[in-house]
Image (tube, grey):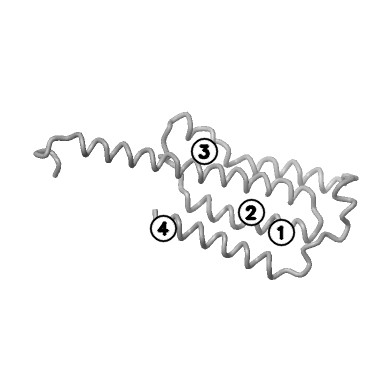
Amino acid sequence: MRDLNRMTFAVAFLSVITLCGCQDLVPHDAPALLLPRFQRSEIVGLVAGFGTTFAALPDLVVMPRRRSSVGMNPRMAAIMGVFQILWVYYGLLISSRPVVAWNAVAVLINLLSVAMYRHFVRQERAKEQKALKSRPATQRN
């Protein structure tokens, strides 16, 4: 649990440092972000972003069905989250709607996955503790 808290702090710290170090965070063509005129490259970007963003969705769907965190790696989700935040930042720098949109959704999916993982890990530990307490003293080795 301490490792997960350290990892969460490291991700947040790196994200804040990255965002504070940039002087060019404001998009150059803000009206174009609100009134889009899509180009072919943006349409390809939207389609590609859809696929890569929702690749992590099966884990998010399966975990509540199983009611277990088995098979999910929170480190991978944390690493992906850091780089997806960087992709959002990059998308703002180059004023790319597809990059910003899909990576913002991907960050949300990763946050939900990690939150669900933590929830089920706590439940599993509580069940283990309860099972250990309910055993007779002779079987607790």
Residue 8: assigned label = none
Residue indicated by mark 1: 89
Q: Amino acid at mark 2?
A: Gln
- Circle 2 packing at 10 Å, graded few (<14), some (14-19), many (20+), is many
- Indicate left or right for 139 with 65 as reference: left
Q: Do labels 3 and 2 touch, CB within 8 Å?
A: no
Count of all numbered marks drawn on residues in the image: 4
Question: Which label lies toward us, 3 or 1?
Answer: 1
Comes first in the chain, label 1 or label 4? 4
Tell me the CA gap for discs 2 and 4. Answer: 21 Å
The residue at 71%/44% (across/down) is 48
Q: Residue at x 35, y 39 (%)?
A: 124
The residue under label 2 is 84
Residue holding disc 4: 3
Q: Amino acid at mark 4?
A: Asp
Q: Earlier in the sequence, mark 2 or mark 4?
A: 4
Mark number for residue 59?
3
Residue 128 in the image, given as x and y percentages of width and height: 28, 39
Q: Nearer the viewer, residue 14 or 58?
A: 14
